[in-house]
Amino acid sequence: MTVQTAAKPWFRLDRHDVRSTLPASIRAIMQNGLLDGMFRQSLAPELLFPQVADVEPWQGAKGDTKIMTRNGLMTPDPTPTTGSDASTGTYSIEQWTVTMDQYGKSIDTDLLVSSMTQASKYLNDVSRLAIQAGQTLNLLARNKLYAAYAGGRTWASSAGTSDTSLEVASVDGFTHVLVNGVPTAVSASTPLNVTVDGVANTVTGVNTSTRVLTLGTARVDVAGDAVVSSQAPYAVRAGSSNDTAFDLGAGDLIKFSHFRAAVARLRRMHVPPAEGSNYIAHIDSVTESQLFEDTEFQNLYRGRAESETYRNLALGVFGGIVWVRNEVVPYLTSAATGYEDLTATVHRPLVMGAGALIAAPFENPAGLLSETGVQDVPDISMINVAPGVDVARIVRPPQDRYQQNVATTWSWVGDYGVPSDSLANGDPAQFKRAVVLEHSAN
């Protein structure tokens, strides 16, 4: 068995002494680890979604797509065997993909400042860069999660005469269908079964730029008609009879019972807990505030005046959930493209279990420059801040004629993927390891 050693936090071959080209005050903060420590502290707090991802490193060139495989289960058979030999069984597989892409940003620091402010200006620039890196990777992971678990359920965004073209608010969850476990683009030969306003239909084509679905059967469109994929994930919405977020209005507030339903769904699907024996809920402050207005939630803490939950308005852990306050949980407004017809701002907390998100980083990013002849020109540190998140902090020596503009860059290579679970538990939902909840703002 080959044992891989961890990448060193920084590497250089001293062919070029980069640090000697920098002012003494900046050299000092690099040598004593202050720069890397500050970069890590500025980056880590932004990574709420990546911190729960499972890690599957891989090698590939930029733009390469890797097909990941997840095995299904054999069907239980409580029937006694007959004859002298056991019958055979089979199981299916399903696939999902990740694409090797590079993410990063640079900031230039002009050293033409007084020696007293040089180091602090440089630290401030690098701190802003690290925050931007954390926010970028956090949104990347978040968007992949929500494209999967909030997809497959939308509505007609405009009215129309009888035809097969249907403009919708979002095409997430309608572009591909699983064929023998393989994600396959929707087409006339591989249609996706849907219902439109409760009536069975099919999608035979998708235009992602115009958000238009091509239907198998012509119909007269009515704005707001619910369009639901046969493989749509389970979702929980406030209110009694809301098919999509379009139907949410003022007063459709979140309650603790909605989160109980999400936990019940995950347990019913045998989804492993994400932390200990608990699932993880990402909620924003509006969702949190509404929970404190819920009667059932209040009854849980009746007579507990010293409760830390009420004292700090911090939910902590209860109800089988670790509650994470996350202000980048996405919400829908009428100002967003495709959602102009919403009558209420829609908040979308998420409850997730283990395996809902996979980080697929480039394996050994510290070795990208090895044996290139220029591996020692920049100063590179690999900053690990979350599972699968080894961000490269790169300092390039001045390249301008005045030798006073230092470029600092962050880089991360990889992708986030959301594995499907369509073969598990005989449930038609393609994704089963998380539940999106939807409610109005007030």
Image (cartoon, rainbow, N blue to C red):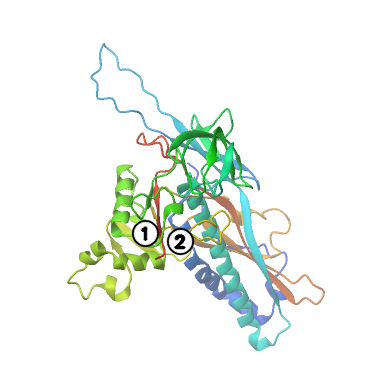
Q: Is residue 33 left or right of residue 424?
A: right
Residue at left 49%, top 33%?
201
Residue 127 percent across, percent down from the top left: 57, 73
Quadrant position of the C terminus in the picture? bottom left
Which numbered disc flags the more N-terminal residue, 1 or 2? 1
Residue at left 58%, top 43%?
160
Callout 1 secondary element: loop
Residue at left 61%, top 73%?
126
Furthest toward the right, the residue is: 401
| Mark 2: few/some/many CA within 10 Å (<14, 14-19, 20+) | many
Instruction: Tell me if residue 143 can be seen.
Output: yes
Q: Is residue 124 left or right of residue 376?
A: left
The type of residue carrying mark 1 is Asp
Q: Is residue 43 above or below residue 280?
A: below
Task: Check contact, mark 1 vs mark 2: CB within 8 A.
Answer: yes
Residue at left 55%, top 70%?
39
Residue 436 percent across, percent down from the top left: 41, 52
Q: Is residue 245 left or right of residue 21?
A: left
| Mark 1: few/some/many CA within 10 Å (<14, 14-19, 20+) | many
Residue 35 figure quarter: bottom right
Residue 283 percent across, percent down from the top left: 40, 62
Instruction: Tell me if residue 166 can be seen.
Output: no
Q: Nearer the viewer, residue 120 or 428?
A: 428
Callout 2 secondary element: loop
Instruction: Identify the residue position indicated by label 1 in the image.
Output: 252
Instruction: Identify the residue position indicated by label 2 in the image.
Output: 344
